[in-house]
Image: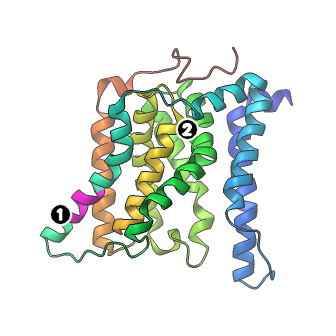
Amino acid sequence: MNMIRKNSLASFFILVFLLPWLVWATTIAQQHSVISWHIPQTLAFWLGITIAVYLAAFISGGKRAVKDLLSRIVRVKVQFKWYVIALFLAPVIAVVTMGIFKLFGGEIVVGKDIATASLPFVFLIELWLFLITEETAWRGFALPRLQSKYTPLKASIILGAIWALWHIPLFLIADSFQSSIPYIGFFISTIATTITMTWLFNNTRGSVFLAAIFHASTDVAIGYLGVMSGSRGLFWLFVALQVLVAVLIASNTRFKQPVRDNPELAFNIEA
């Protein structure tokens, strides 16, 4: 137990891979006729991630670490401009992508995966999902601990790579969104997205709520506007613009500065 406590990040990553991957493995096994049943995929999020993050938090820092997680989820008092950025940055990148693509003769299809009328409902569902599961884990737990050791940029690259690897089973599941796109492009996109989300997180006092808004907005924009599920040219153009935004953010001097001395951004498990 003492070893787990001293290696809380490694313990968390093991758990957050093991539990969801076990859930997704049943779907993969079923589609290959190895078994005749599967565990509902949503449990990979609702149970797998939730168990992993709160168990790792409690073992590593007890009630204090759990309280830190919960406080980030409800941290909503931030400057209004960050709400605007969280809501509209990804859709703006997507719209610019579509404009450039259409300018060069590309074909655009909107609303194929998400109907216009259902946009608010889908956004709210995804906001709740990411707030309670993924963003509590990746931003609420992992990112502050990584930033206690590394600069925001290095922490983002590490976390982005791990986050991209975590999605691998979804690329093996037939009819999933991930199975229809190139993994290398997704990997690059995830690292770029993580850099942008670290910037947002660090400027909103470590708010998981704002990170969840950005995550939900990004997924809804991608689904509704079809910038990743359309043609390969559109896909790679969108990824390129995501990378461009991430590079602009990473080149900022303030973004490169360590945040380990800021208790709101870098949770010190030794304290």
Q: Amino acid at mark 2?
A: Arg
Residue at (69% x, 82% y) in the render: 31
Residue 95 colored magenta?
yes
Quadrant including the N terminus: top right
Image coordinates for residue 257, horizontal then vertical, percent: 40, 21
Q: Vertical placement of 68 versus 240: above or below?
A: above
Asked if 258 appears above or below 122 in the picture, the reply is above
Name the main secondary structure of what is drawn in magenta. helix
Please, is residue 230 above or below residue 133 in the view? below
Residue closest to the eye, 238 or 45: 45
Question: Do residues under tags 2 and 1 come within 8 Å of each other at their CB atoms?
Answer: no
The image quarter in which residue 61 lies: top right
- What's the amino acid at mark 1? Ile
Provide residue 37's location: percent of width, then percent of height.
79, 78
Q: Earlier in the sequence, mark 2 or mark 1?
A: 1
Highlighted range, magenta: 94-98
User: Residue 139 has which mark?
Assistant: 2
> Element under label 1?
helix
Say left or right for 84 vs 73.
left
Judging depth in this view, the residue of 227 and 216 nearest the camera is: 216
Q: Is residue 139 visible?
A: yes
Disc number placed over residue 265 in the picture, else none? none
Residue at horizontal 78 percent and vertical 31 percent from the top: 58
Q: Residues within 10 Å of mark 2 (few under 14, many from 20)?
A: many
Q: Is residue 11 left or right of residue 123?
A: right
Residue ID for mark 1: 100
The image quadrant that residue 117 belongs to is: bottom left
Q: Residue 220 is drawn in which quadrant?
A: bottom left
The quadrant the C terminus occupies is top right
- Is residue 129 highlighted in magenta? no
Give percent across and percent down for residue 77. 47, 26
Q: Can you see residue 228?
A: no
